[in-house]
Amino acid sequence: MEENKPSLAWIEIKTPKQKWVSKIFSKYRDVEIIILNFLPYDFEDFIANAIILIHHYKIEEIIEDIKTHPSVLEFTILERFENRAKINIKTEDPYLLYAIIKNGILIDFPVRLSEGVAIWKLIATRKRINDLLLQFEERGIDFSLLRILNSDYSIDDNENKLNPEESQVIRKAIKLGFFDIPRKISLEELANELGKSKSALSVRLRKIIKKKVLFES
């Protein structure tokens, strides 16, 4: 398989014990959790924003357990039904998300979780996927590469293509270590390097990442 050809990879990742997902699956083994969206929220403090759908007959108890978990910084119920809820959660240190951004990998949403394990479908060149898996190993993330094959999907199609200014911003951010953990340059320092305000750069980065990281079927 050529390193620079588009590839599809299915990766199984076990949720770390300190995260709220692990606690929910240990307590409610038959719960269904679907990640609908997952993006950075605060570039200063490595906070991610996720929209998640949860199905279970004990939905009220699950909501309370999530709200009070120490890894959850902010919790909002978007939709509520008898045995189902769509929620918005903000959490710290989303290493998976930042590693994917750094390596220029697309995530195919939604992502389903079962028994504390998520299967992520990723779209990128074979080299970028290899780089991501190497970082997972170095970080001690519990994962398995289930399958990888060539993809007909064009990574550089017009819908996901960055304009010259956006390309410059993301290349500079990666080169200076903005997406490294620990971070090598702050948002304010990166903004100064690019001649932008901190708030304007934060908005621009969100738009770039939404275009380049999300792939919704």
Image: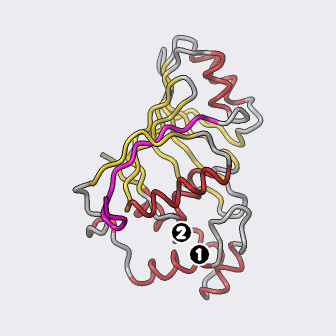
Q: Residues within 10 Å of mark 2 (few under 14, many from 20)?
A: some
Q: Is residue 9 magenta?
A: yes
Q: Nearer the viewer, residue 140 or 80?
A: 140
| Identity of the residue drawn at 68% across and 72% down | 187
The amino acid sitting under disc 1 is Ala
**Residue 80 visible here:** no
The boundaries of the magenta stretch are: 1-15
Colouring rule applied to residues: secondary structure
Secondary structure category for the residue under label 2: helix
Where is residue 48? Give x, y as percent. 61, 51
Residue drawn at the location 37% of the way across and 79% of the way down: 163
- Residue 171 is situated, as x and y percent measured from the top left of the image, at 52, 78
In front: 133, or 73?
133
* Residues marked 2 and 1 touching at CB (< 8 Å): yes
- Residue at which label 2 appears: 205
Task: Specify whether residue 76 is painted magenta.
Answer: no
Q: Which residue is mark 1?
A: 173
Vertical order, 216 against 75 (above or below): below
> Seen from this angle, which residue lies furthest right?
70
Quarter residue 196 falls in: bottom right
Give the quadrant of the C terminus. Answer: top left
| Residue 57 - label | none
Instruction: Name the amino acid type tagged 2.
Output: Leu
In the rendered image, the vertical position of residue 2 relative to residue 138, given as above or below: below
Mark 1 residue element:
helix
Residue lying furthest left: 152
Q: Nearer the viewer, mark 2 or mark 1?
A: 1
Q: Position of residue 122 (x, y in %)?
A: 41, 50
Comes first in the chain, label 2 or label 1: 1
Q: Can you tell which quarter of the image residue 3 is in?
A: bottom left
Relative to 72, 4 lies left or right: left
